[in-house]
Image (cartoon, rainbow, N blue to C red):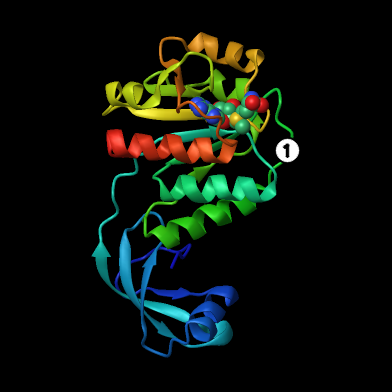
Amino acid sequence: LFVDSPLAAGETVPLAPAQAHYLRTVLRLGDGAGVAAFNGRDGEWRAVLAGSGSRAALRVEESRRAQPESRGPWLLFAPLKKDATDYVVQKAVELGCRRLCPVLTRRTQTRTVRLDRLQAQAIEAAEQCERLDIPLVDPLRPLAETLADWPRERRLFVLAERRNAAPAARCFAQARGQDAAFLVGPEGGLDDTDLDAVAPLASCACTVDLGPRILRAETAGAAALAVWQAVAGD
Ligand code: SAM
C-alpha cells in the first residue's frame, strides 16, 4: 500500500478515507491485520491496521525490503486518447520505466493531460507490480523543450517504423549498462519536424525499429520497454 508519509518503526501513518475503505470494506481486514506499506523512499515496511473510518491508520513495525536504487529507462510519449494514455503509464511502470515524459509532437491529437491522474495511475501500477519506487511523471511539454536540456549520457532511442532503422534489440544490447530513454510518436506517427528536433542530439540518439509491423503507439512503448528489460535487465 502506498502512503505519502515517512516510514520507520513505531510511526503511525493516518490512512486516506479511500484507503481505509479499501482495506476495511473491500479486503475485509480487521484490527491488527498485516499490511505491506511503502512510500517510494524508505523501502517496504510491515505495518498493522488500527482504527477505522477517519481514525484508520497503520502502525509501522519492521522493515521488510530496503529501498532499491532507482534506475530504469525513461519514456517520452505523445499523449493518446484517455484510456490509451492510462495504458501507456500502467505498462511503463510495470516494465521498469523510471520517468514518464509526456511530449507534444507535431501530430499529437490529445494536447492536454491531467498530471494528477497520470501520477495516480503510476502509484496504482507500482502498488500492483510491487515495485518500491514511484516513477516520476513530468508535466506535458513540447518535444523540443524536453530535448533542450537533455542529459547527453542518456541514450535516446527514437522508435520509428519503416525508416530503415536498426533493430531495437541489437541497438539496446550495444547500450547495455547505459542510461536509456525511448521516444514514441502519437497515433499519426512522428513527422520530420519531430526528427529535426532530435537531430542536435545525434551523439546520443538513434532511430530503432521494433519489427515489420506497425504497432499502435501504446503497444510500441510497452514493446520497447520489454525488449530493453530482456536485453539490458533494467
Ligand atoms: N505513422 C504510422 C502510420 O500512420 O502508419 C503509425 C504510427 S504508430 C501507430 C505510433 C508510433 O509507434 C510511431 O510513431 C512509432 O514511434 C511507434 N511504432 C509503431 N510501430 C513501430 C515499429 N514497428 N518500430 C518502431 N516504432 C514503431
What x and y, as percent, mark residue 102?
Answer: 60, 36
Residue at x-position 39% and y-position 52%:
133
Whether ligand 1 has any atom under 8 Å from the Cβ at mark 1 is answered as: no
In the image, 47: left or right of 109? left
Pick whichever, 157 or 57, lies toward us.
Answer: 157
Q: Is residue 30 visible?
A: yes
Which quadrant, please, contains the C terminus? top left
What x and y, as percent, mark residue 101?
Answer: 55, 35
What x and y, as percent, mark residue 100?
Answer: 52, 39
Q: Secondary structure at mark 1?
A: loop
Q: Is residue 199 above or below residue 102?
A: above
Q: Is residue 184 visible?
A: no
Residue at x-position 62% and y-position 18%:
194
Which quadrant, please, contains the N terminus? bottom left
- Ligand 1 occupies quarter: top right
Residue assigned mark 1: 110
What x and y, as percent, mark residue 213?
Answer: 52, 29
Res 34 quadrant in image: bottom left
Q: How many marks?
A: 1
- Name the residue furthest bottom: 31
Residue at x-position 30% and y-position 23%:
175
Q: Is residue 155 above or below residue 88?
A: above
Q: Is residue 166 above or below residue 223?
A: above
Pick whichever, 145 or 186, lies toward us.
Answer: 186
Pick whichever, 209 or 139, lies toward us.
Answer: 209
Res 106 quadrant in image: top right
Residue at x-position 41% and y-position 10%:
203
Res 198 quadrant in image: top right
